Image (spheres, rainbow, N blue to C red):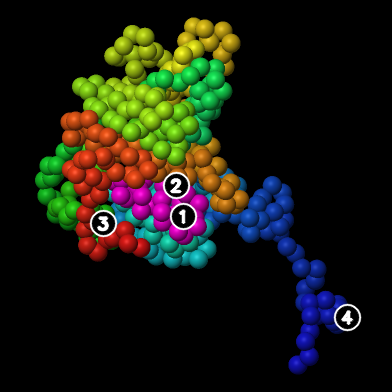
Amino acid sequence: MKTLNRRSFLARTLAAGGALSLPWFVPARALGRDGAVAPSERIVLGGIGLGPRGQYDLSVMLPEKDVQFVAVCDVARRRAEQVKQMADTHYGNKDCQVYRDFFELIARPDIDAVLIATGDHWHALASLHAAKAGKDVYSEKPCGMTIGEIQSLADGIHRYGRVFQAGTQRRSVHNFQYAVHLAHSGRLGRLHTLHASVYVPTKTYEWLPAEPEPPKDQCDWDRWLGPAPWRPYNSRYVNGGWRGHHDFEAGGNFLDWGAHTLDLCQWANKADHTAPIEFEATPTSIIGKYANGVKLICDFLPTAFGNRDPQYHTSTGTCPVRFEGDEGWVETGDNGQLVCSENLTKSLTRQFAGTGLSSAGHGRNFFDCVKSRALPVCNQNIMRSSHIACFAAQLAWQLGRKITFDPVKVEFVGDEEANRMRRRATREPWSFNI
């Protein structure tokens, strides 16, 4: 048979009287017209372990016109069905697929990226497997359980050439960005002290009472545990009650807020490539010191600094940070307000709407980078340094003594016990050697 190209085929069809129904109709939506995004330009997204925070993240990602959410995996069927209903309602169809095994989801060749919002103990390993499967990753924080997991995750993202965004969304919120701008621009003078509000660290080793294990198609308890040590099933774990338990929560809950506030202090100090070199716990804080002499104070009071010292303000909301320099200071938090030293108040009247809890801008930054292959604002390199700094600070509290840290070698100087605590064993068959 002679070769018949497309132009010849159309010419012969027309000459034959239009044996095919011509002209062919191509919907404008398929071409990216009428405000729609052509399928070839869409990012196909899946979700793994989307509880309350993950469902919130998804709620601000679904409206993105160039993103199509197609699948969810959760070991708890009820929660997976909730996410499916969210997606199907948004798109007006029943297309969202539900999986119990995340390996089936990441094996889909049509999925470009995944949103991971499992419990802390699954973040790093799920992210690594997704990256190995060729998926870009948006992972809620904390992104790992130990310094060793964070190193393995960051190295794996580089090895597999993926785009990674840590869910420390306050780097994408305008009031925090502006506060850091003041620190970088010299308006505060030479920085000397940074304040990060954090929860009081805790460590709980007790098991909740054993309950009858449900059928796997309702809740796969063994898969929920994953790399964490085995313990008997209790429904409270699966429904969010895992928080506060050492086996399931990173850094004794220090990273719940420290992953945000200490990260912002790192940014203000232009220390995204490093970490403080020493840490010491006090009854109300953990005090660190950078090689450049800047002091870092991780204050245990979670609501606002003002509860401890009247010079600090309570009007900036939760998750406040404060940057102090020789010529002034600025404090800001989740309600978008800026509070400044008196000498800066008149010239810095700008206030910001919104909340530090919003991940809308952070998700948009991730999707833009999925397309451009640029580094997101909270990429694996930034996440590595700020998370390691958090873990090191928490260990000073847990050990109850001053510790010295080498950010280059990522090890504690002359402290064998602290160095052993950089890693935890994982339950078989789960391993970070992937």
Residue 380's disc is 2
| Quadrant of the rendered image containing residue 313 | top left
- Residue beneath disc 1: 158
Residue at x-position 32% and y-position 28%: 288
- Direction from residue 80 to residue 235 in the image, left or right: left
Indicate which disc, 3 or 2, sits on the residue closer to the N terminus: 3
Q: Position of residue 386 (x, y in %)?
A: 39, 38
- Residue beneath disc 4: 15
- Direction from residue 43 to residue 420 in the image, left or right: left
- Direction from residue 104 to residue 423 in the image, left or right: left
**Circle 4: element type:** helix
Circle 4: residue type: Ala
The Cα atoms of the two marked residues, 1 and 3, are separated by: 24 Å
The Cα atoms of the two marked residues, 3 and 4, are separated by: 65 Å
**Is residue 337 shown above or below 82?**
above
Q: Are marks 4 and 2 in contact (CB under 8 Å)?
A: no
